[in-house]
Amino acid sequence: MLSPFDLLIVGAGPVGCVIAERAASQLGWKCLIIEKRNHIAGNCYDRFHESGILIHQYGPHYFRTNSKELLDYLSQFTGWIPGNYIVKSSTRGELFNFPINLNTLEQFFKTSLDENKGKALIEQIREPIETPGNSEEFVLSRVGKEMYEAFYLGYTLKQWDRHPKDLSASVCGRIPIRFNRDCRYVDHDYQVTPDHGFTAMFANMINHPNIQVMLQADYLELKKEITPKRATIYCGCVDDYFEKKLGALPWRSLEFDFREYDKEYLQPCVQINYPNEHEYTRSVEIKHVTGQKHPRTTVSYEYPRSKGDPYYPIPAPQNAELYQRYQNLAEQETRENRVHFCGRLATYKYMNTDEAIESALKTFEGIKELYG
Ligand SMILES: Cc1cc2nc3c(=O)[nH]c(=O)nc-3n(C[C@H](O)[C@H](O)[C@H](O)COP(=O)(O)OP(=O)(O)OC[C@H]3O[C@@H](n4cnc5c(N)ncnc54)[C@H](O)[C@@H]3O)c2cc1C
């Protein structure tokens, strides 16, 4: 039996690494991280492809945050380069700025606009739906039918295999519409990427004498053999923990096809969306973000799948209800057995990396108070 550890952490993703680092360096606790994959960093994992190009294995990760405090915390483990996050959408045979901004509106409606004219145009074309009840209504209420069909409908159908009518408004609600010419993908105050990649950042974070990592080890198979002295942090799927006894929580998955090209760059920017062409949703040339200098390039094509690694929880009311029932079991497990559920898989919640790390820091404060 393995038990000289204070804290057992299941999953070496961002959440597991942050909690291990805090507990080891602030409290001097001995931590064991067990991870079922053969690497750390969870879905933020990046590695060198056979071509020598640094790739994001599980989809592009555009790090951004509004929190200076969070950035300062992470800066102990990495330097940064600016995040060059530019996305275009390919529709009607042309590439448009995306999210929609004044340039998109001008190109799409073949007219010239300023901020006021742009707002007046949108007022004319948007549908007057006061409280949108689903994603279709949400987008119609913001940009009207023509742009909904050009930019959103096909992409959403491919991504979720569901009609936007059957998805909650929040799915498309994450996308801003701008009345300026800001071409950046997101609005956050800090948009940066680790200068040596995410895996290097998380490796530095857990490089501590009190932290031990076991790779290719599935907690669910080892559960009975490891008893931590203080608590367990579980970052795996919550339904797996309870052997799916209430039923399986559905996830949307992706398959990535990495192709290599004998040229320095293939695309004008990191990401191109294809709402109405191809089986894949987007093509990603991560070199635009990593800034790596290399004579060749690698582009990944993303195919949404209903089976595979769990990437996106499916935002539908029946899934939220099922999760709620698992959450009740999880809370009981915390009270009775000191198992704390944290992170994207354990809370059935889509979180960006900054949000996942914030939640890890909060969980750490909680366990420090309880067992410190
Ligand atoms: C396609 C995609 C694109 C994304 N793009 C962005 C982006 O642009 N910007 C951004 O900020 N965020 C992005 N994210 C989100 C980011 O990946 C997550 O916020 C972050 O990885 C969450 O950290 P986590 O530790 O909760 O989970 P994870 O990274 O999923 O780590 C959990 C770890 O637990 C391990 N595990 C699970 N079960 C067990 C078990 N039984 N035993 C042992 N180990 C186990 C898993 O193998 C995994 O390594 C993206 C996510 C996806 C899927």
Image (cartoon, rainbow, N blue to C red):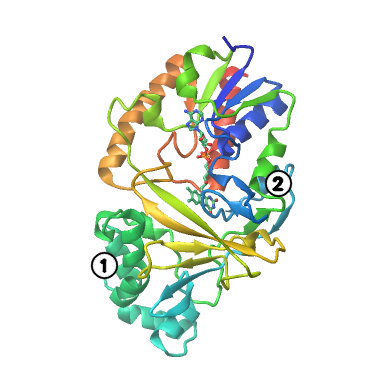
In the structure shown, which secondary structural element does the residue marked by tag 2 occupy?
Answer: helix
Q: Position of residue 280 (x, y in %)?
A: 41, 61
Going by the numbered disc 2, the residue's amino acid type is Asp
Residue 105, above or below 158: below
Q: Quadrant of the C terminus?
A: top right
Q: Quadrant of the N terminus?
A: top right
Direction bottom: furthest residue: 111
Going by the numbered disc 1, the residue's amino acid type is Ile
Q: Position of residue 294 (x, y in %)?
A: 70, 63
- Would residue 164 be found to the left or right of residue 72 on screen? left
Give the alpha-carbon distance from disc 1 to disc 2, as whole Å: 42 Å
| The CB of the residue at mark 2 lies under 8 Å from ligand 1 | no
Residue 105, above or below 156: below
At horizontal 39% and vertical 28% (from top left) the residue drawn is: 240
| Residue, disc 1 | 129
**Closest to the observer, 340 or 256:** 256
Disc nearer the start of the sequence (1/2) = 2
| Residue, disc 2 | 72
Asked if one can make out residue 211 in the rendered structure from this viewpoint, the answer is: yes
Asked if one can make out residue 83 in the rendered structure from this viewpoint, the answer is: no
The answer to whether the residues at label 1 and label 2 have Cβ atoms under 8 Å apart is no
Q: Residues within 10 Å of mark 2 (few under 14, many from 20)?
A: few
